[in-house]
Amino acid sequence: MAHAQNRYADFEELRERAVALRRQGHRLRRIRDELKVFNNDVLNRLVQGEPPPEWTKRPERRTT
């Protein structure tokens, strides 16, 4: 278990980089590849609280 802690020991620095990428409009896959964080739980914790980019949202369904 110590290995996992060492790998993400500098979580705050990773979070700052992940938030910056998210605010530039990058999707999670791009952030994952850029930061080389392949654990989805850690990736989601890194961007927690940051809204997804507008372009990734689906349009609302129209009713006629």
Image (cartoon, rainbow, N blue to C red):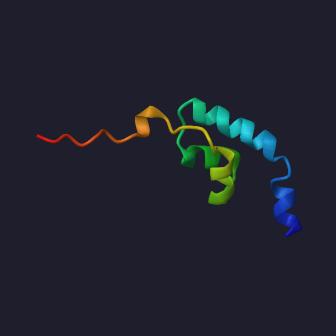
Q: Position of residue 30 (x, y in %)?
A: 57, 44
Residue at image location 66% in from the left, 36% down from the top: 19
Determine whether 23 is above or below 64 in the image. above
Q: Position of residue 47 (x, y in %)?
A: 64, 43
Q: Split into 4 quadrants, where in the image is the N terminus?
A: bottom right
Residue at image location 86% in from the left, 52% down from the top: 9
Q: Position of residue 14 (x, y in %)?
A: 75, 43
Q: Split into 4 quadrants, where in the image is the C terminus?
A: top left
Residue at image location 84% in from the left, 46% down from the top: 10
Camera-nearest residue between 62 and 5: 62
Residue at image location 62% in from the left, 48% down from the top: 33
Q: Furthest residue to the front?
A: 63
Camera-nearest residue between 45 and 3: 45
Determine whether 62 is above or below 24 in the image. below
Is residue 64 left or right of 49 when viewed as pictured? Answer: left
Q: Position of residue 38 (x, y in %)?
A: 66, 58
Q: Furthest residue to the top?
A: 24
Is residue 40 left or right of 25 when viewed as pictured? Answer: right
Q: How many marks?
A: 0
Q: Furthest residue to the left?
A: 64
